[in-house]
Amino acid sequence: MADISKNYNIKHLINWHHGNFCVKHEDSTIEHYEELKRIALSWGIPEMTHKEFVLGIKKELKCNQNKRKFDECIICKKLGVPRRRW
């Protein structure tokens, strides 16, 4: 049986990408979100797969991929959550 990917609304994909990729980086700001949204909506495609969206965004959106450091989370310290080291 062929693996057929489902198409999703572009607005859903924008929010999905921002929530799963962008917020984990240091430069995650409202301006970054607006740039992501502007690029995706400029394509004029109402629906696409997650894979197509990610590949298209990687080509056009230039952002800092430095992940945030959560080593010193104040809330985690207060709750006594240990830091995991893999």
Image (tube, rainbow, N blue to C red):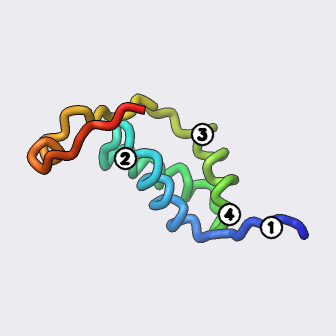
Alpha carbon distance from label 1 to label 3: 22 Å
Identify which amino acid the numbered label 2 is placed on.
Val
As displayed, is residue 57 above or below residue 26? below
In-image side of 39 versus 69 (left or right) = right
| Mark 2 element type | helix
Q: Which mark is residue 23?
A: 2
Say which residue label 4 marks: 48
The residue closer to the viewer here, 52 or 2, is: 2
Indicate which label's residue lies in the foreground, 1 or 4. Answer: 1
Instruction: Say which residue appears at 68% left-offset and 63% top-offset.
Output: 48
The residue closer to the viewer here, 29 or 34, is: 29
Q: Quadrant of residue 1?
A: bottom right
Mark 1 touches mark 2? (CB < 8 Å): no
Q: Quadrant of residue 25?
A: top left
Instruction: Say which residue appears at 34% left-offset and 42% top-offset.
Output: 28
| Mark 1 element type | loop
Instruction: Say which residue appears at 25% left-offset and 32% top-offset.
Output: 71
The C terminus sits in image quarter: top left
| Mark 3 element type | helix
Mark 1 touches mark 3? (CB < 8 Å): no
Instruction: Say which residue appears at 63% left-offset and 58% top-offset.
Output: 50
Mark 1 or mark 4: name the one nearer the start of the chain. Answer: 1
Residue neighbourhood size for the residue with mark 2, other residues' Cα within 10 Å, grouped as few (<14), some (14–19), many (≥20): some
Viewer can see residue 7: yes
Q: Identify the residue at the far right of this view.
A: 1
Alpha carbon distance from label 1 to label 2: 29 Å
Identify which amino acid the numbered label 3 is placed on.
Lys
Q: Position of residue 62 (x, y in %)?
A: 51, 33
Identify which amino acid the numbered label 1 is placed on.
Ile
As displayed, is residue 43 above or below residue 10? above
Q: Position of residue 9 (x, y in %)?
A: 59, 70
Q: Which mark is residue 58?
A: 3
